[in-house]
Amino acid sequence: MLQFDAWKRVAIWLTCAVGLLLAMPNAFYTRVEARNDAVAAIELGEDTPEQQAIAGTWPSYLPSGLVNLGLDLRGGAHLLAEVELSDVYQSRMEASWPEVRDALRPARATIGGIRQQPSKPDELRVRIGNPENMAEALVIVRGLARPVQSLTGVGSTDLAVSAEGDIIVVTLSDAERLSTDERTMQQSLEIVRRRIDEVGTREPTIQRQGTNRILIQVPGIGSAAELKEIIGTTARLTFNPVVNRTGDSNANPGIGNSLVPSLDEPGQYFIIETAPVVSGEDLVDAQPAFDQNGGPAVSFRFNTSGARRFGDYTAENIGSPFAITLDDEVVSAPVIQSHIPGGSGIITGNFSVEESTRLAVLLRAGALPAELTFLEERTIGPELGQDSIDAGKIATMVAFGAVLVFMALSYGTFGIFANIALIINVGLIFGLLSLVGATLTLPGIAGIVLTVGMAVDANVLVFERIREELKSSKGPARAIELGYEKALSAIIDANITTFITAVILFVMGSGPVRGFAITLGLGIITSVFTAIYVTRLMVVIWFERRRPKTIEV
């Protein structure tokens, strides 16, 4: 006999109610979106009467999660950037000079004087005074090599050291270059993602393309130029030893040094050692603050290794100036008064409150390890997105209406039950999309349209099976029960195979393909639920009340 326990009935209707409640904010999209933006602004400290009024336009006790609209629906900015990996090789070689110099100094009695020579960006060249003892020098420098930290570089070292006459040539090994390229790309992806997340954009697409390119798509942002400004700001912070100070912009800094301008004193320049003592990569936190005179500043804190190097340097160089440089400009050049342990400090300068806050955000997000060259940029207007939304609505309504009419004409009362379940099914899809914060793209709309057609498949299997059982002279109750029992295996098999396809599309695909896979996968889950439980429960309730002697499907 047809039976449904009371707790099952409650659970089914409660699930439907919760799903439709979660989907409800999407029916008031503009209003709820403005409310969410106002709440976010209030949490960031912008607590104005206008923001409070906007925040009050939607009840706080109702769900406020929305389905995020993708770039093709909302409009926004599209960038394709190339990471200049050669910059990383140059930085590594510049940072290696102090280490090589310090390692060779104890052997000066035999190898002679040590002097850095002009080099290509990806190599370090060091001349020694006694080339007849080159073998000893090579052994010392090769001793600085470390194992490559990657699976592909097992058994390899990071430095390749050779000799050309009286010159030691140090470069990165092939295995280290591959490992460095991979780390640089991963770090660039993460930093770009952090910077975009800091400005509160919704569901950006940031993914790697090829060996050295990054695809960036951000819905809802004004223009590609605005996006480039957010991403392209380097905010590279370094602490460098000061060699000299000059007012000559054409001064020769010498090999291993750099000439950088002063940010606070126009016309003044500092000659600093290119290899930093500590860099922004060692930062673990940066916050806007105020100095002892009440001026805007930025407080910072290093990690353990950075704190140790910073502390050792300040202990050994008391009375000497050192430069705090930001994007190749000296922010300040204080004299070290005492040992600075703990790895924390404060950056002062001619900042406004807004500039100190922005600088703290950029430092927190980290410096890009290499320059980004933008190969392609597009600004997609919302008008194009609105056209896509309108076309998607029309397609969905036509498909939805055709399915409703077909089911009602083909299966009568049972078809009406299937139509009600189909409406609930679409609501549940949007409820799940809102709950997980998924992004709806134009292919995602296609996935929903496809789900509308597929959602009735399970009901068609059940109803056709009930027809066959009725032809076998089964009673109405027995026919309905057997119809659901015998159709269950076919329903499960068909939907599991489709769900596996959706999972493969999500794992292997990217961008629009993933959007299609998400809506298809969620649609399969909700359609199976509504077909097996919701439609069956409606049929059971109808049968319990009518108790028909015969039924027509």
Image: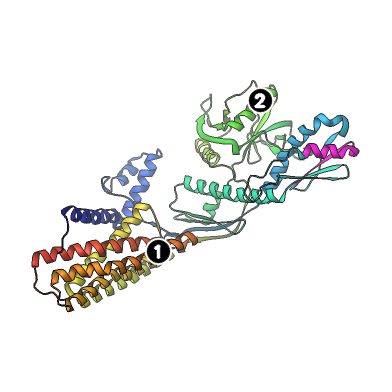
The residue indicated by pointer 1 is 444
Q: Amino acid at mark 1?
A: Gly
Q: Residue shown at 21%/56% (left/top)?
A: 13
Residue 129 inside the magenta-drawn segment: yes
Q: Residue shown at 28%/62% (left/top)?
A: 425
Residue 538 inside the magenta-drawn segment: no
Residue 234 located left or right of residue 95? left
Looking at marks 1 and 2 on the same chain, the residue that comes earlier in the sequence is marked by 2
Residue 149 located left or right of residue 401? right
Region of the chain picked out in magenta, as a range: 123-141
Which secondary structure lies at badge 1? helix
Mark seen at residue 432: none
Q: Position of residue 327 (x, y in %)?
A: 63, 41
Looking at the image, is 242 positioned above or below residue 387? above
Q: Amino acid at mark 2?
A: Thr
**Can I make out residue 510 in this image?**
no
- Asked where in the image residue 348 lies, by quadrant, the reply is top right
Callout 2: 10 Å neighbours few (<14), some, many (20+)? many
Which secondary structure lies at badge 2? helix
Q: Residue shown at 41%/63% (left/top)?
A: 500
Residue lying at the far top in this picture: please name it. 338
Query: Toward the viewer: 465 or 48?
Result: 465
Mark seen at residue 314: 2
